Every structure is written in structure tokens, then in C-alpha cells.
Amino acid sequence: MALHGREAELKELGELVDGPEDRSGVVLRGEAGIGKTALVAETAAAASVAGLRVLRTTGAEAERNLAYAGLHQLLHPVRAGVAELPPPQRDALRTALGLAEGAEPSAYLVGLATLTLLAEEAVAKPLLLVAEDVHWLDRASADVLAFVARRIETEPIVLVATLRDGVSSPLLDAGLTPMVLARLGADDAADLLDAVAPRLAPAVRTRLLTEAAGHPLALTELPSGLAGLDGLDPVLPLTERLEKTFTARVAGLPAETRTALLVAALNETTSLAETLTATGALLGTPAAAVPGGDAGPSAGGRCRVEPEILAPAVEARLIELAAGTVTFRHPLMRSAIPAAATPTDRRRAHLALVEALHDQPDRRAWHQAAASAGPDETVACDLDRTAERARYRGGAAAAIAALEQAARLSEHSGNRTDRLLKAAELAVESGRRETAERLVHAANPAGKRQRATASRLLSEFEDGVREDPARVAELAVTAEAVAADGETAAAMRILWSAAMRCFWTEPGAAARKALLDVADRLPIPDDDPRVVAVNAYVAPFERGDVVIDRLKKLAGATGADPEVDRYLGSAALQVGAFDLAARFSAAAAPGLRAQARLGLLPRALAVQAWSRARLGDLAAAAPVAAEAARFARETGQPFMYGLATAVQAEIAALRGDHKQAKTLSAEAERTGLAAGARPVLATVQLTRGLIALSEGRFDDAFADLRRLLDPADPAYQLALRAYCVSELTEAAVRAGQTDAMRDILAELEPLARCTPSPALHIGLRYARAVLDPADERFAEALRADLTGWPAERGRVHLAFGEWLRRQRRVVESRTHLRTARETFDALGMTAWAERARGELRSAGESSPNRGPDAREKLTPHELSIAQLAADGLTNREIGQRLYLSHRTVGTHLHRIFPKLGVSSRADLAGMLKTLDG
């Protein structure tokens, strides 16, 4: 009956079950009681008939603070398969679910383990995953479900989730198709009411239709409460009127039944044994063992409360009893009962549950907290331990909630502040900005240490991009004060946070100097990777000599610590050592993947992609940039997403795909412009300059690129401005702006005397040769060590060949033009290769057009998989690297082989090796 008027939605869900390969699933949204549960139940029944296996989980408000409670419910029927997972995934999932002790698991590794387990189960029978009331799922479980939803498009798995209107959830951004359930139309509402209550008096029927206003639950439940309908305030929202209807229904039940219902409503689980045990404690009556269920830890013969105590509630259509479980027919029924109880009754029920759950410390702690009438340090300490266990299992949201509750119960203000700051630290680590800010402000830190911690925590999101650049100078003062108290590690952390701001924003010379002064006084060795990185970010030219010397010495020891490699890769990019930046960041990525540190991974990947693109290694840069963008978006890092997208735009421009380059540039600019994320905007302007150069719009190219050197322009970035000199010079010469370019060189030459920056010196040598062309200047540019810089070598050969041809030294020009054409063909830099071809033809040498590189037939994601397969990795190993199921990897390879005209991994490896050679 509850499906009256839902035929279209039911058909759409049925089609989803019949053809889940087309999409990963649906999220049903609507107000409470709108019919989401009925639709899902009908869909699940149809799926079972169609041969799918149905796995379910349902969020419960009382379980929101129990990490992975929802995931445990979902995976319980398939838990035997956990033992067959790869060891890192197996250990992470077992720890998360509380089945074993182990190192704190990453949420992403738990997600990958869940995906692998479900994909394996789906081999035997396709799966329908049902997640109801996801607004009440614990955050850790919701994050895992969102992770899985993004990756099941090629699996025989479909996810159907239900969510109340006006509530956020990670599943809303997981690629699920939205389906919004509206209230029923007048005819459907009338049909449903007539089916539920067929013999109503016309006046009553009209009143009910008006009161229900098309709300399915109201249409089915209000008729049973007609006696109390006149007493309801018509101004109250319908949800509250329904709750009052349910409360009135409860009021007519026996006192013992009302007591049992209150306990069941406050309990986190549907365990009938727990409900009866706690009820027995409240009534002073031992409870009997429950047929079909566990009698519970304290049931052991002491309890004589029978399940029949709940029979009146079943008859009143408030609950349903099954084998060992008690379930409310609707969440509104569950929430109405405690709301109507007195504070004393609620407290007594919570204490009864504390007694019943004596071997479950986390649940006990929460019930004890709910029963506390005021500050209680003993209970607060219990919640501290609950938070630590939640964090240990990877449940950051649950740990934050426990610490926040512990803070409320703290007897001393210092303890309260420490707990809130600890919770804020976890919020920062898990990317919850609003939560962290709320907790820091609520902490009201008093001491110097607490104020320094609060200051640092508020500065760690988005590298401070949205903050006033003046904040950098404040952080320098904070770091100095913290260092003076002997907190060297904390001071270094604050300095690193401030240094990153010098990349994204421009704080000014005074703030940069203040940071350096504090860093120089810290008792930390000069070759510490953090010190190297701070020097590079804050003073890329003044400290460039020292930084590059340290980087070269450390280059032979990559791979030991991915965090160290990430620091060094970032440092190398700042000082224009793109070859070293690519090496360090590439070394960091495998370790970050293995540790499932997906928040840091896109940072390392973005540095690698930016550097590879500047070096001209587009084949390597493209899949890395795409992966960086994907993970940055998934982990909620908008400016890293903007930077990775801008790099993708640059790659498209270099390949001659100007339409794609313009689209990606616009998207990256939207991300970076509002907050003035300078590296994003600088890369966008570089891309636009490359497009204009390719299209022969040289005035536009010079104008676009010159913006990078204007301190008043949001695209100005202190370090990056010096690393596009070659492109800027080429645009200037062709636009007739040589005098302006000479002025620019006069500003950059002093920087070159401070630093051996490869990118800066390569650009300056090219500029000198092109502005004042002579054999010796071009020869000097080619004599430089351009190992690992093929694009720059090709650019010099092209410019040299063009100049020689204009000097009528045609035969000499052909050698350089031919080298340039071959270099740019190999790199996939289409526009530059075509220029070399045109020059060669003008020099009297035929130069046929190049056919498309086989790699250009693949998407960046496919190219990444193809390269890993060519390196000899199995599908499972590729899946672990890219956080995909191995079956998804296999599906991609089946698409890749025909595109490339190969039929085996050996053929694939041979083809890619030939292209690389």
C-alpha cells in the first residue's frame, strides 16, 4: 500500500537492478516518512528474485559515534571472505571492524579492502548493497561506502542508499544517481488512504487528506490515531504531529511495555536480549533468555522479563519482533519515545543499559555520559579511552565525538581545552575544516602552548590559501614563541605551515625574512628535509644554492620515507630543479599509496605532474596529473585539484588539443581565482600563453605570459615566474617586444647569480641566444647539461635551425630542425613538431606528417593502467596502487588492448617500450 503513486520510481530502481553495469547506484532523498524504506524493500525483494545477493546496513542515530558500526552490519554476512584479502587490506579491515588488533588503519585502505571483498563476492552472484538512513551512519562507514560507490561502475554491484532531505553525506558526492521523492499527488494520496482506512466518514477523510498533505506515512498512520487528531496543533510541522501521534499511541500501553520501549529506543542496536536485560534491571525483575537470540552477558539465569512484555507495542504497530531483534517500524517512532520521556526516566534507562553492557566499554561510556547530570571526570576519562580506541580503528569522526563529549564532562577547564584541541587535531587530519574551526573556537585556549596549538590548527587547511597573507608573519611570531619554550618539533610544524603559504599566496619580503630568521635559529640540522623545504618555499632564489646542493646529496637515498621524499620533491620544484622534483615525488608516491595516505598522495602526484610537463615528458605527466586531480577532489583539496587540472590543461596545450586546454584552464581558473591561489593561476596563464603561441597570436601570448611577472597580478608567483623564460622570450621576439624582454631579463639576471636553478639558467641561455642570435650563444645553450630536459633541448635546436635558415645556411639548419622535429614527435608536443616540419619543408626537406602516438588513443586513466601492466604488475597489484578492484583493472585492460591493437601484456609492454625508446 505504501507504494501507491511510486510506480515510476519503482520502475527506475528495477532497471538499475537489471542493468547495474550502466551506473553505480542511486541515492533516494526525501523527508522522513516519504516512502524511501518501502521502495528499497520492494527493490531488494525484486533483486533477490532476479538472483542478486542483498547486503544491508541501516544507520541508527544512537550508533553515529561507533566507528564502522554500519560497515560491520553490511559486511557481516560475507565476513568469511576477509581472510582471503591481501594481507594489508585484511589487517586494516579486521582492525577497523574490531576483529583484531593492529596498526591504526587508513580509511582508504579500509575502503579498498571493502571494495575488494565485495568484488570477490560479486563473482559468485551480483550484489545489491542497501544503505538506509545514511544520514545516521557513522562517518567512517559513510566514507567507505562513498569510496566504494566511486569504483563499482564496472563491477556487478549496485548501491541503493536513502537519505533525508536537508542532510549532507559523503554519498552525495560519490557519483550516485539522485532520485528525489516528492509527496503524493491528490489522487494517489486518496487511493492510499482509502486502501488503509476504507470506511471513513467523508468529513474525517477530507480532514485526514488535508492534514497528511500527500505524506505516505501520515496517510497510513494518522487514521489509527483519530482520537487524538483534534488535539494536535495544525501549525506544528507534520513530522512533529506524527511524533505526537506515536507518543499518544505509546501512552495507552502498559507501564512495563513503555519502559521496555524506552530502553529499546535508547539502545544503539536492535538486540532484543540487551533490551530485556536492561528492562529487567529497571523493573527489578530478572529477564529470560530470548528464543533465537543471545541472552546477553548478564542474562545468565538472572533475568525473567519475557519478550511478551513488548507484545502490546507490536499490536500498536510501533515495533516488529524477529529472531532476537526488536525494530521500530519507522525512525520517527523511535525518536518520539525518548523525546516524550522525562529526564529522570531517560537517565535511569541509560544507567540500566550501562549495567547490561558491562563488557562493551565504548557503548557503556556513551550511555554513562548520557546519564551524567553534570561534570564527571571519571566518565570523561572513559570517553578519552573510547576516543583512543576509535582513532586506533581509524574512526576519526567517532573519536572526535567522544573527545567533545569528554570535554563537556571535564571538571577542569585545562582538561576541557586539551580535549577539544585534541579533537580539533583529529578533525584537521581527517579534512573536516568546519569541525576543526568550531572545536578550536570552543576550546578557548589560555596557556601559551594551547594558544600556539590552536593557532597552528586553524592554519592547516588548504595551506592557508583563503587567509590574509599577513597571517604568515603572525605564524613566524608564534613559531618563535613555541621554539623558545623548547617545543622545537611544534615550531618546525608551524614554520612548514607558514612556508606553504608562501607558495600559494604572497606575504611579502618582510614576512619571508621573519620565517627564515626563526628557521635559522632552530636547533635542527641544515640537511633536515623540513629545513630544506622551508628554505626552498620561503627563499627559492636566495637559498637556492644551498637547497640544490642538499637535494643533490639526498637524491641517492630516495624511497626510505615517502614523507621525506614528498618534502624534497616540493623543495626541488620551488628552486626550478624539475628533474629532481620529478624523481623525489615519484619516489614518494608508492610509499604514500602503500600507507593509504591519500590526503598527501595528490600533493606528491601534482608536483610530479607539474615537473614532468615542464620537462616535456607528457606521456608520464598525463596519467599522473589525472590521478592527482581525482584524488584531490575525492579528499576535498580544491586547490590541489585546481593545480592538477591546470597541469592537465598545460599538457593538452602542448599536445595541440587547444579546445581541451581551454576548457581545463577555465575550470582550474574558477577554482583558483576566488581565493587567489597563485600557482593555479600561474599555470593557467602559462597554458594560455602556450595556446596563443601555437595559434600564432604572439601579442596575446606575450601578454598572457607577462602577467606571471607582474607582482600586482594574481597569477604572479615568486618562484614560478622565473621558470617560463623560454616561452616568454619566444612570444616577445615574434610579437616585436624585444626591448620589453630585455628589461625583463635585466630583472632576472641578478636572481641567476644567487642560484644554480636549472630552469632559470636554461631559460636565460635560450633568451640570450634568441634575442641576440649567434652561433656561440646557441652552442652555449646546447652545451649545458640538458639531460632529463628534452623539451628544452628541442626548443634550442628549433630556434637555432630557424635562425640558420633565415641566415640562408639551409644545409646546416636541417640538422637542427630534424632533431627538433624528432624530439617533439617523441614527446607528443604537436604544435612544436609542426613548426619544425614547416621549417624543414621551407629548407627543402620533405617531412611527412606524424601519425598519432598509440598512447594518445588512451585516456590518462587507461594510460596509467597500461603502463603499470607493461611494467609487469598483476591486476591485483595495479588495483592496490590505484585504489581500484582488480576486476575493474581487468575491464580496463580489455578495452585498452583493442585500442592499441595488442592481444597480450607482452605485446603491450613491447609497444610502450618502443614508443618510449
Image (cartoon, rainbow, N blue to C red):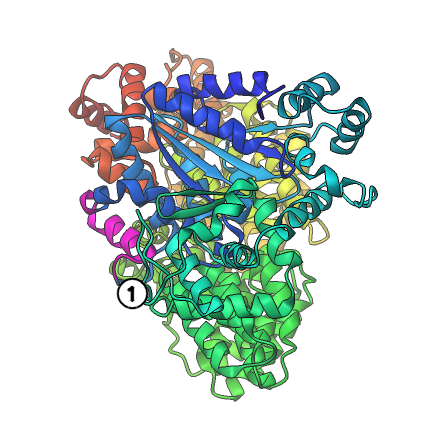
Instruction: Specify whether 879 is left or right of 795.
Output: left
The answer to which of 171 and 806 lies nearer the viewer is 171
Q: Residue at x 38, y 19 (%)?
A: 857
Residue at 46% across, 72% down = 383
Side (left or right) of 149 relative to 4: left
Kind of residue at badge 1: Gly
Most foreground residue, 733 or 493: 493
In the rendered structure, does residue 753 fall within the stretch colored magenta?
no
Vertical comparison of 259 with 238: above or below: below
Q: Which residue is mark 1?
A: 301
The chief SS type of the magenta part is helix
* Other-residue count near label 1 (Cα within 10 Å), few / some / many at <14 / 14–19 / ≥20: few
Answer left or right for 903 relative to 464.
left
Check the image and report above or below for 467 versus 372: above
Q: Which residues are magenta?
A: 83-100
Q: Position of residue 106 (x, y in %)?
A: 36, 55
List x then y, in percent, for residue 331.
Answer: 57, 45
Residue 544 visible in the picture: no
Tell me residue 602's x, y (percent).
Answer: 44, 47
Element at label 1: loop
